[in-house]
Amino acid sequence: MATLTLESLGKTYDSGASAVRDVNINVADGEFLVLVGPSGCGKSTLLRMIAGLETVTDGTIRIGDRVVNKLEPAERDIAMVFQNYALYPHMSVRENLSYGLRNRRMAKAEINRRVDEAAKILEIGDFLERKPRALSGGQRQRVAMGRAIVREPSVFLFDEPLSNLDAKLRVSMRGEIRSLQKRLGTTSVYVTHDQLEAMTLADRLVVLRAGKVEQIGTPLEVYQRPASTFVAEFIGSPAMNLLDGVMQGHALSIAGASLTLPHSHQGPVRVGVRAEDLRAAPAGTTGGLPVHLRYVEELGSQRLGHFDCAGERLIAAFPSGQALSDEMALMAPPEALHLFGADGMRLA
Amino acid sequence: MVENQRWLNVLAHAVLILGVIVVALPVYIAFVASTHESGAFMSGVIPMLPGHNMVETYSAVLRGGVSSQISQPIWLMLGNSMIMALMIAVGKIVISITSAFAIVYFRFPCRGLAFWMIFITLMLPVEVRILPTYKVIADLGMLNSYAGLSIPLIASATATFLFRQVFLTMPDELVEAARIDGAGPMKFFRDILLPLSKTNIAALFVILFIYGWNQYLWPLLITTDPSYTTIVSGIKRMTDVQDGTPMWNYIMAVSVLAMLPPVAVVVFMQRLFVKGLIETEK
């Protein structure tokens, strides 16, 4: 168990390209931190720097009180679960689990105790003697996690561990990872590009963009108060609607409608509104956005309406059974609107 | 693509049978010749069926009862060939797998240059560099020794290249997992790379053993001491008869015996051999 501290961490490749810039994160003991972002945002690089698989060019990484910048991965007291499992194909499951422990010259009895315990937790006891080739994807994933567990490390690192599984298995493994981490209480850093995975797993989310931290917060904070249009569009499904508008004092004019907002600003803004915050109203309602219905997606529990609003796309979520017409208006309470400046950063 | 037309089947079989005949007929004739009297093949009509002299010929050859014809006991020559072929095969594998390991997994200055230097030696087989190599071996006092027989043939760009390709297919994550598991470079090599290259090593061993066994020019050149004669050059020496005709039945018997060890290697390692050539999944 330990804290993990990243201080002005940066990575610049020999070619001059910078993958990670000025990252400052404190991970509390036992916390589950999720790094999320689109591909190429530097999240995997960041994780690999913590693991010691990539060199650190700027800043420091601390695990507990120890600066680990220059330590080999094996000396950092971490364990990593890889996307492709990275099990040793010629070793049985038991050998896969115990290999790292044997390399540390741990006593045989202790190795066996740990392997058996991990096997019990993960329910892989029945195929300890099998080779990875004979296992299904989900079983391999468990073995890969078992390999991390037996080391009893200070920090778990997960590099998109679920992305090779089918959708159904992914959901159940997600739950298992979460409950396992709570049970073991081990500090964890988890990388994913799947915002839903990030939302459901994280104690805290770090949204990364082009190697820099865009926002850090609990999943709800990030969802309810996105720091930028980038985060607003990335977190949440369907993505937050963004429309161009102009503010003059407290008055916002947007797509032919005008609203009065609690906060004031001068100039052009991007206005964000979540699909579930929009309500249907008859066409011509004052304060409503005039929209044209393009098509409807039925999800069973709700229906998603896709609209045209003055040339921009808009998605709104309604309870199932809500009647929709071709020409109508959408209303949003002023407090549900997110305002972003021309640079994309949150205004209020 | 599975075509199931009759004439295609017939054609396929015809081609295969023709191929087998082309390969097997000379071997068969060698065997037939070894079972006849020594003069039978000089009589003008080549016999196509085995004769009655098989037992006598082979027992004479094996017991060394024809020492006037065979310069050295056949067991000695077979032994020499075996030692040379094994040293070449094992030496080539050991050297090329370690150099491929260095080239693929270590970043050192002039790494690309080192690889290309190795690669260029592909253009320099023994026959091309035979004079300088002979000079070097002679100056080192390695004429008439097993070391002299095998060491100049051990360096192998082909095998290095093959292992390089094998190592390049190993997923990077495996290397990283091993690093996290605390395996240093040599431990990774021994515990993970070697076991995973097992089938490739076996396939290469088969090819290299046969290559070593069939060496002719080099052993002929550097061994003057008859006790280092290999079986292949021994057969050649048997045909050099000062007066009279060569004893073809004995020569053919020795040839047939000389074929057996490579055949045995292929037969026993066939499964691993095929696996090593076609297996891609790691």
Image (tube, rainbow, N blue to C red):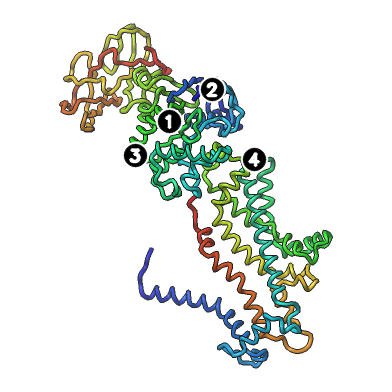
Do we see residue B232 in this rendering?
no
Indicate the position of residue A102 as horizontal and vertical percent values: 55, 41
What is the x, y in percent for residue A199? 36, 26
Q: Which chain letter matches label 2?
A: A
Q: Earlier in the sequence, mark 3 or mark 1?
A: 1
- What's the mark number on residue A64? 2
Task: Indicate which label's residue lies in the foreground, 1 or 4.
Answer: 4
N-terminal of the pair, mark 2 or mark 3, is 2
Earlier-in-chain disc, 1 versus 2? 1
Q: In the drawing, does residue A341 fall left or right of residue B244?
A: left
Per the model, the C-alpha gap separating discs 3 and 1 is 22 Å
Q: CA distance from mark 1 to mark 4?
A: 31 Å
> Which mark is nearer the camera, 1 or 2?
2
* Element carrying mark 1: loop
Hey, which quadrant is residue A191 in on the image?
top left
Numbered circles on residues, count: 4
